[in-house]
Image (spheres, grey):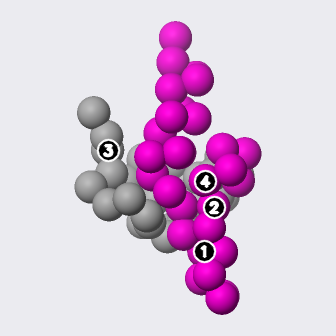
Amino acid sequence: MTNCKKKFVRYKEGAEIYSIGLTKFRNLAKEAQAIYKIDGMVLVNCEIFEKFLEGFHL
């Protein structure tokens, strides 16, 4: 089940949704290659980010 109801979020919203710090969310999103840059705006694809997070599941 997905935590995110949207496909794309900004850093601040994503950090709140996943209950992690802003810097940690930003770094994980970059590592997951889930970042989209449009002009000066950055969006994170929740679907890609969550697939990446599943790799940490124990």
Circle number at residue 28 = none
Q: Residues within 10 Å of mark 4 (few under 14, many from 20)?
A: many
Q: Which residue is mark 3?
A: 3
Q: Earlier in the sequence, mark 4 or mark 3?
A: 3
Asked whether, in this view, residue 10 is left or right of residue 22, the answer is left
Q: Which residue is mark 2?
A: 35
Specify whether residue 39 is in view: yes
| Relative depth, front residue between 37 and 30 | 37
Instruction: From the top left corner, tell me how far across and down residue 49 is, in percent.
Output: 53, 45
How far apart marks 2 and 3 lie (CA) works out to: 18 Å
Q: Residues within 10 Å of mark 3 (few under 14, many from 20)?
A: few
Residue 38 found in image quarter: bottom right
Residue positioned 51% across, 26% down in the render: 54
Circle number at residue 34 = 4
Q: Of tags 4 and 3, which is closer to the observer?
A: 4
Circle number at residue 42 = 1
Asked whether, in this view, residue 26 is left or right of residue 1, the answer is right
How far apart marks 4 and 3 lie (CA) works out to: 16 Å
Q: Are marks 2 and 3 in contact (CB under 8 Å)?
A: no
How far apart marks 3 and 1 lie (CA) works out to: 20 Å
Q: Residues within 10 Å of mark 1 (few under 14, many from 20)?
A: few
Dot 4: element: loop
- Tell me the amino acid under the disc marked 2: Ile
Q: Earlier in the sequence, mark 3 or mark 1?
A: 3
Q: Are marks 1 and 2 in contact (CB under 8 Å)?
A: yes
Q: Earlier in the sequence, mark 1 or mark 2?
A: 2
- Tell me the amino acid under the disc marked 1: Val
